[in-house]
Amino acid sequence: MELPKFTQFVILFVAIFFSLGIKAQDETVNAIAMQSDGKILVGGLFTSINDIAKKGIARLNPNGSIDNSFASPLGSSGVNAIAIQPDGKILVGGIFNINGVNKTIARLNTDGSLDNTFNSTISPSLYLTSSILLLPSGKILLGSLIGVIQLNSNGSTDYIFPQSGALDMGFQSDGKIITGGMGASIGSVVMRFNTDGTINTFKMSQNFAISADGTTSIAIQPDNKIVVPLHYISLSYLYRFNADGSKDNTFMIGATGAVNKALLQPNGKILLGGKSISYGPNTLSDIARLNSDGSIDTSFKPASVSNGSVSNGYSVNTVCLQSDGKILVGGNFTAVNGVARNRIARLNSDGSLDMSFDSANSVTLLANGIVGSSYLFNLNTGTTPNKTYALASGNLPTGLYLEGTYAAIFGNPQVSGNYTFTLTATDSQGNQTTEQYSLLVSCPDMNITSAMPDAAIGSSYLVNLSSTGGSGSYLYSLTSGSLPPGLSLEGSYGAVYGSPSQTGVYNFTLTATDTKGCQTSKSYTITISCAGLAITSALPNASVGSSYLVNLTTTGGSGDYVYSLTSGSLPPGLSLEGTYAAVFGSPQQTGSYNFTITSTDKKGCQTSRAYTLTIAPSGGRLAQTSSLKGVQEESISQDLTIYPNPASDKIKIEAPKVRSVQIYDAMGRLVLEDKPSGRKYQALELEYDIRSLVSGSYFIKVFFDEQIKVLKFIKN
């Protein structure tokens, strides 16, 4: 029967602690960590990789070959945890000997050498580090079977957490810390702590009765929900808890053989590593994947591990996700799906074995090259003098050449890529050996140097793009987001041009590609704002009963202005005609009125103006004007009727003794004038043909002997 990992961990602890100084055979990988450059840190209980001495920790190149530039001081070693700091330094936890001193935590420099500025006095006989958690404050949490210790950044002890052991840890978005370890009940297996280390109220033990022996994995989702495999003797059950510790009933709970590691992918899916994992009636093998709701991801090919043909007792201990979606797994196996893979393997994103990755690879890494730059590498070193070389298989990078007699690779690489090839070396005695080489050709550092200024709607816009660092001319493309409406990218000539037609904030990315195919990208944010609009019309004061008409005007926009009352209220008796831009009517009440009028142009740009209009009591006669712009005229009681209103063909005025009639359009332009005389002056009704007028609002101004009246009518 397969033992859960936490039980194996206790056995491993005893085995390591009492076998220091004794050479261990290659046994297990317990920890994997990815560096930002794609190299892979591997920790566990081993003394060599591919017959090269590497005790407890090693670094692999992206293809699985050993990075011999990394050399650690660890002696007899068992590494359970690795954490990479933001500065690239490496924290290792477990139990190991450094310069004759047993330690449970150490920090290495980026080349593997010991960082002597870090010094922890934690005794491995009391605390055997099983997990490491880097806190946002720069402090470090060590988890062990019997406790959690917080260290300062220099390794000194800061605080010992109460009542908690931790084989794995994580923190929620508010900084609260979740630990998982061994305990008598679910409430002691999974615990939550405040940022100061005090125990936080958690519903884990309050919602349902679960007796769990322990857990080896804590996975915290972006929504702070917690995925935990809980172990019971020889079985595991995978649960998901809400952020407060209550059970998430939307998540399917499945019985499994032994889940040692649960790892969240960015898409919410859950990778499982362990032994003989089953889910309901389905046997998923040793590496499996679930959907975010806990159902089986049928697109993933479950993988099994073994030692040759023997599968029982061999499991996956750790899982690590690369940025490209590929999956690294480590454990005590020697084969994956029957293919030889010694304790570490890489799967493709669909679960199939990545055949390009093998820690048994032996590849010599040559100095990197840069596209467009001179390159020279001498193959004859102090350990391999006086050899001649010939290309046995593969191809050199385009633009590079092998000078076999002088043992040099030289030239000017033209295309980026990772090139692998085999050379045959012949010494002075005629003896030949073959060796595989890898040469990485990278693009040079390129930059798009052009700034992209903000602009006003309707303005002319032109930015000529320029880049540095590449070869020859550049071709530009829009690779994410969108340009502001009205602007275009001319990729061949490198220009963003046009006239913005819509306001807003626009985010986009431009990519420049040089003649060698090398690329660089730059993200931009452009804000398109309205031009300087202003309402220029004044609103003069008026008196009760007077006829009032002011045509509104705006400058600076795109035309076709529409006006609206956006705060306050007009004096009773006055109205705003928004489409035809007029304030008109006859004030009915004295007072001082505050209001704001907003003008909106055809592009949606707006401007506002606040007004104060005072209405005085009626009295006095106002002078006549020939334009309705700014008129303010007193009305003496005089009967006046116009009809029909609206009208299509003719409009009639019913009033006696009319001296003059003027009709103005909404812009204040005089479109018709009549001065009745003789019989017409005496008539009670006047009729005017308006068929020639365009549809819209009009104002008719009627002059009597003692007064003037203004009324509005609509032409259909």
Image (cartoon, grey):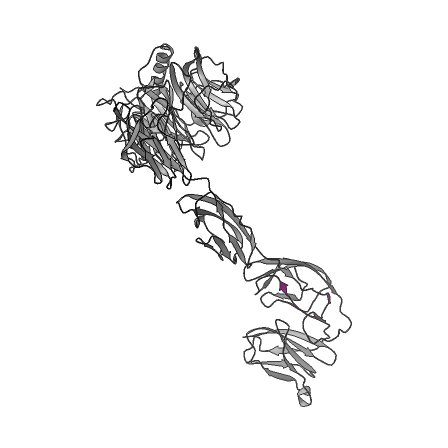
**540 or 685: which is nearer to us?**
540
Residue 212 visible to the viewer: no
Task: Report x, y in % for residue 120.
Answer: 49, 16
In the rendered image, the vertical position of residue 474 relative to residue 630, given as above or below: above
Q: Which residues are magenta?
A: 540-556
Task: Report x, y in % for residue 151.
Answer: 51, 20
- Quick one: quadrant of the N terminus? top left
Task: Based on the picture, tell me whether residue 541 belongs to the magenta stretch.
Answer: yes
Quarter of the image holding residue 361?
top left
In the rendered image, the vertical position of residue 55 relative to residue 414, given as above or below: above
**246 or 560: which is nearer to us?**
560
**135 or 58: which is nearer to us?**
58
Name the residue at 51% across, 24% down.
Answer: 139
In the rendered image, the vertical position of residue 399 relative to residue 620, given as above or below: above
Task: Report x, y in % for residue 5.
Answer: 34, 20
Name the residue at 41% across, 15% down.
Answer: 95
Left or right, 135 with respect to 595, comes to: left
- Quick one: quadrant of the C terminus? bottom right
In the rendered image, the vertical position of residue 601 relative to residue 446, given as above or below: below
Q: Residue furthest bottom?
A: 679
Task: Based on the picture, tell me whether residue 543 belongs to the magenta stretch.
Answer: yes
